[in-house]
Image: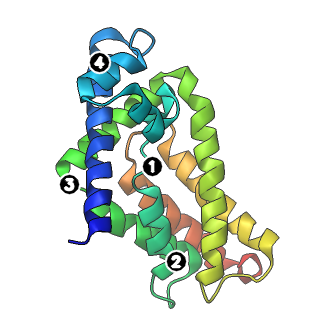
Amino acid sequence: MSADGLRERKKSQTRRAIRREAFRLFHEHGFANTTVEQIATAAEVSPRTFYRYFGVKEAVLLSEDQITPIVEAFAAAPPELSIVGAYRHAVAEVFGRLSPEERDDLVTGERLMYAVPEARGLLYTAYVELTDLITEALQQRPDAPTDAVERRVIAGAIVGVLIAAAHNTPLPENALLTMLSILDAKLADDPGLQ
């Protein structure tokens, strides 16, 4: 494994360790009664390291580990797939590679996120960022519109489906895949929408 690969693996392990300890402490003491210092101590990192990985305490609830791989898999999906089909393919591919531990981590974080009102603003920000990433990735798809506004509308529709599937439902893999299929079919029924 390359030095970059080892570095990325170490970062991923540190991130997971911080989240795991944060979840444990939130369960024991509650979100509001758990400090960043307590989380850092339990994870055997400094508070500065915590902030480097998460920025704010609420961010530990968001799992962004799948966003980049899904967007990358979307951009690289087979060209014969429709845009929505390519995103569905990417979601299935990335979720299909999750280990049981990673799935548990995602479900725990999402359950807590939906229960903590302070995390709602971060969730909104994450959806806007995902819309931006999909809009940008669409430039690599052969069937994507050339108009930036049209690409953003398509990205917004995909993220809208994600929001509808995910609201208060941790790791809604099957519902998300089904809803993306519905969106894909509806777009295929009306060529004026593609």
Q: Quadrant of the C terminus?
A: bottom right
Q: Position of residue 173 (x, y in %)?
A: 37, 54
Asked whether, in this view, residue 149 is left or right of residue 121, the answer is right
Verify CB contact (< 8 Å) between mark 2 and mark 3.
no
Real-space Cα separation, disc 3 to disc 4, in angstroms:
23 Å
The amino acid marked with disc number 3 is Ser
**Callout 4: SS:** helix
Asked whether, in this view, residue 11 is left or right of residue 123, the answer is left
Name which residue lies at 50% across and 84% down.
Answer: 81
Q: Which residue is labeled 3 in the image? A: 99
Q: Is residue 157 visible?
A: no
Q: Nearer the viewer, residue 49 or 85?
A: 49
Closer to the chain start, of discs 2 and 3, is 2
Q: Which of labels 1 and 3 is toward the front? A: 1
For mark 3, does the 10 Å Cα neighbourhood hold few (<14), some (14 to 19), or many (20 or more) residues? few
Q: Which residue is labeled 2 in the image? A: 75
